[in-house]
Image (tube, coloured by chain):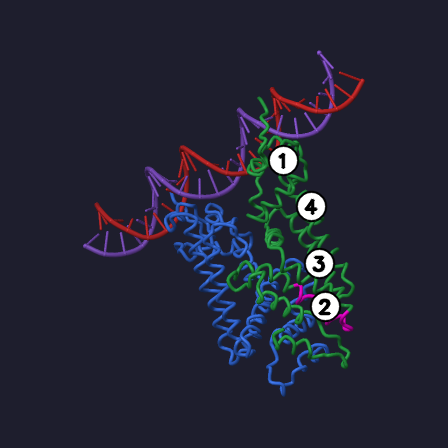
Chain colours: A blue, B green, C red, D purple
DNA sequence: CTGTCACCATACGCAAGCGTATTGACAGCG
DNA sequence: CGCTGTCAATACGCTTGCGTATGGTGACAG
């Protein structure tokens, strides 16, 4: 049986790597969910057949595992690293707020993974990634708040806003401001004002952030 | 072919209604996602075979449609009705905050529906329900805030918290306070303080809600 | 040139699940 | 009692998708 290389395919004549497959799987997950990751259709989208797939992977679960490892490395570690470059906790939270509202693709992917019912290995990755994101946030709030319980409350609420933002943008699209609009900038500013606690030093401008919010910056 | 009635089944000898099927489908959706709703396995769980299913429904989509209509009626209309009995907007928001943090099942179901990739009719229901919930919330904030843009910001953020709460409880389970704990009560109190704007009348106790939050009620 | 290996194509068998067709059971009514 | 309609059981055919087995191709080393 002759092997006919399709030159117009994604890999343009070179052989596919495990990483190519993993990335194709992540794309499919973001577009259509984890269940939609199917060996044969993925192979077709890569311009090969499943013979090639089964050379690289023992089964579908191995592909999904490779895809999740890639996801964790590329998108999750990198996000926290970018935020960690900010000089102070408030800036770090601000950076996270900005980033969370930026990438639709990353949102879709996170939700797809978070809500996947099988295989069960997905849950392990999602919980680990979510925990690390939460802990990063929590550490920021611990720097801003003397009271550790309060810091935890803040972190929980903010983390909920992050996750909820992903979801809400999907569920109420016509209520969501366009990304290049004044309204959007204002909303992000409002989030920043609302989600960064004013320091508990009484001589600080305590009510100023709320007043600025009400004054429409 | 003899029809053997299985007396130990869910319907306990009586015939199944369309509603029985719809509720079974919603249960399956909450447990395992929309994709897991399968005619034959659902029939088995109800103690019948798919002959019975096809008497009631032309196809699987009709079942899903019936299930979604039931969902909208039972859980969504009812939630807003309960909140609407509260005498003022702040109490209504407080009621919603309490309810959102109460039912795990409803959470799982909402997320399953929101993240279903097919059939496409699910999206219509989710968006309609989400829009109605958002609009209810927005109306509350419009009563509390003079500035309509600010009211919209508040509504968006709070709605994001509601949705994010569903997700976060699933993704960071060990960070989530137990429902009967002091910590949980405190967190709900913190949400209430944070998500209900203090009125913009300057003579009102503007900083008091933040101060109370920091003081650990 | 030959052999090896990485990568890939294809055929096959099996299972799950959908929808269709056919038949059966039973209650209610005239 | 016979008929009708509701509800349900079962067989069948088809599709999709997984994993296994087998064989092919091209690059490279010896």
Label 3 close to label 1 by CB (< 8 Å):
no
Helix, strand or loop at disc 2?
helix
Q: Earlier in the sequence, mark 3 or mark 1?
A: 1
Residue B152 numbered tag:
2
Q: Are marks 4 and 2 on the same chain?
A: yes
Per the model, the C-alpha gap separating discs 3 and 2 is 13 Å
Which chain does tag 4 point to?
B
Q: Which mark is residue B11?
A: 1
Q: Is A198 situated above or below A117?
A: below
User: What label sits on residue B70 in the rendered view?
Assistant: 4
Please tell me whether residue B20 belongs to the stretch shown in magenta.
no
Identify the chain of the residue marked 2, using the numbered disc in the image. Answer: B
Tell me where residue B14 sits by quadrant: top right
Is A20 left or right of B201, judged from the image as shown?
A: left
Element at label 3: helix
* Residue B150 covered by magenta stretch: yes
Q: Residues within 10 Å of mark 3 (few under 14, many from 20)?
A: some
Mark 4 vs mark 2: give the one in front: 4
The disc numbered 1 marks a residue on which chain? B
SS majority, magenta: helix
Rounded to the nearest angstrom, the CA distance separating label 4 from label 2 is 30 Å
Cβ atoms under marks 3 and 4 closer than 8 Å: no
SS for callout 4: helix
Residue wearing tag 3:
B133
Q: Quadrant of the C terminus of chain B?
A: bottom right
Mark before the other along the chain sequence, 3 or 2: 3
User: Residue D28 versus residue A66: which sits nearer the camera?
Assistant: A66
In the image, residue A95 sits, relative to residue A46, either above or below, namely: below
What is the span of residues highlighted in magenta in the rendered image? B144-159
Query: Do tag 4 and tag 2 residues touch (Cβ < 8 Å)?
Result: no
**Could you tell me which residue is drawn at 48 percent across and 63 percent down?**
A129
């Amino acid at each position: 049986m002759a092997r006919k290389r399709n030159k117009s395919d994604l890999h343009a004549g070179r052989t596919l790597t495990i990483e190519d497959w993993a990335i194709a799987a992540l794309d499919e997950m973001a577009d259509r969910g984890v269940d939609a990751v199917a060996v044969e259709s993925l192979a077709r989208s890569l311009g090969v057949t499943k013979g090639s797939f089964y050379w690289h992977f023992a089964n579908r679960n191995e592909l999904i595992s490779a895809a999740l490892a890639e996801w964790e490395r590329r998108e999750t570690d990198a996000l926290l690293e970018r935020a960690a470059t900010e000089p102070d906790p408030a800036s770090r939270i601000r950076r996270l707020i900005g980033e969370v509202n930026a990438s639709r693709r990353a949102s879709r992917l996170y939700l797809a993974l978070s809500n996947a019912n099988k295989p069960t290995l997905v849950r392990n990755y999602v919980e680990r990634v979510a925990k690390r994101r939460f802990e990063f946030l929590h550490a920021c709030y611990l720097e801003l708040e003397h009271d550790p319980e309060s810091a935890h409350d803040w972190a929980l609420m903010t983390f909920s806003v992050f996750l909820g933002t992903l979801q809400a943008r999907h569920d109420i699209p016509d209520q969501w401001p366009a990304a290049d609009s004044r309204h959007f900038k204002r909303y992000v500013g409002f989030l920043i004002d609302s989600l960064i606690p004013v320091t508990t030093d009484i001589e600080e401008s305590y009510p100023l952030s709320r007043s600025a919010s009400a004054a429409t910056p």
